[in-house]
Image (cartoon, rainbow, N blue to C red):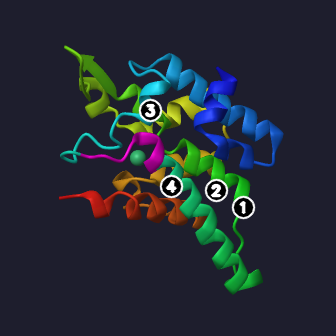
Amino acid sequence: MKDKVLKIWPEINWIKDEGLKEKVLNCWIYAIENSVLSIEDLNIIPFSLLIKDCKISFMNHKRTCVQLSVEMTKIMQKNFGDEIKINMDILIAGAILIDVGKLLEYEMKDGKLSTSHTGKLVRHPFSGLAIADRFGIPAEVQHIIATHSKEGDLGHRTVESIIVHHADFVSFDPFKA
Ligand SMILES: [Fe+2]
């Protein structure tokens, strides 16, 4: 399963800290093993069930978010220098994990994918956090998962979370009706 996850998520190898990389991998393996979706489905299903005729896959959307986060960070580091401190490993791990909980949000009824009752009550920032905690993901990364969505709008976001939040929404909002 580990190799299969690395195949759909090559960006996991961008994490330099081996311990953190292993934890991120374990979160994804756990989520896939406990989901109604198979690992292959992730490259097929639309990234949002709320967008009509969405042709962008879940993995395309998620990988775009990670890649955007890293590119934004590089430009900010180049232009702002010592005025800003961004931890690249924390940022990448967070961007890779923000939607891991989504795998537990879905249910399959008569071959049709939808959001389950539990998924509506416990949205993926929360279920993702539970997965992350189970595998010892550090607080700085848990914070990104917890605050990446609208649930994080009322509180404080770290710089890594601000970047990931915006990268997520620029690859989502243009597709909204
Ligand atoms: Fe999300």
Residue occupied by mark 3:
42
Looking at numbered disc 1 in the image, what kind of residue is underneath it?
Asn
User: Which is nearer the N-term, disc 1 or disc 4?
Assistant: 4
**Label 4 near ligand 1 (CB < 8 Å):** no
- Contact flag, marks 2 and 1 (Cβ < 8 Å): yes
Tell which of 40 and 148 is nearer to you: 40
Mark earlier in primary sequence (3, 1): 3
Tell me if label 4 and label 3 are in contact, CB under 8 Å. Answer: no
| Amino acid type, callout 4 | Thr
Residue 87: which numbered mark, if any? 1
Residue 39 left/right relative to 107: right
Rendering quarter of residue 83: bottom right
Query: Which residue is disc 2 drawn over?
Result: 91
Q: How far apart are the alpha carbons under marks 2 and 3?
A: 22 Å
Distance between mark 4 and mark 3 Cα atoms:
14 Å
Q: Secondary structure at mark 2?
A: helix
SS class of the residue under badge 3? helix
Figure quadrant of the N terminus: top right
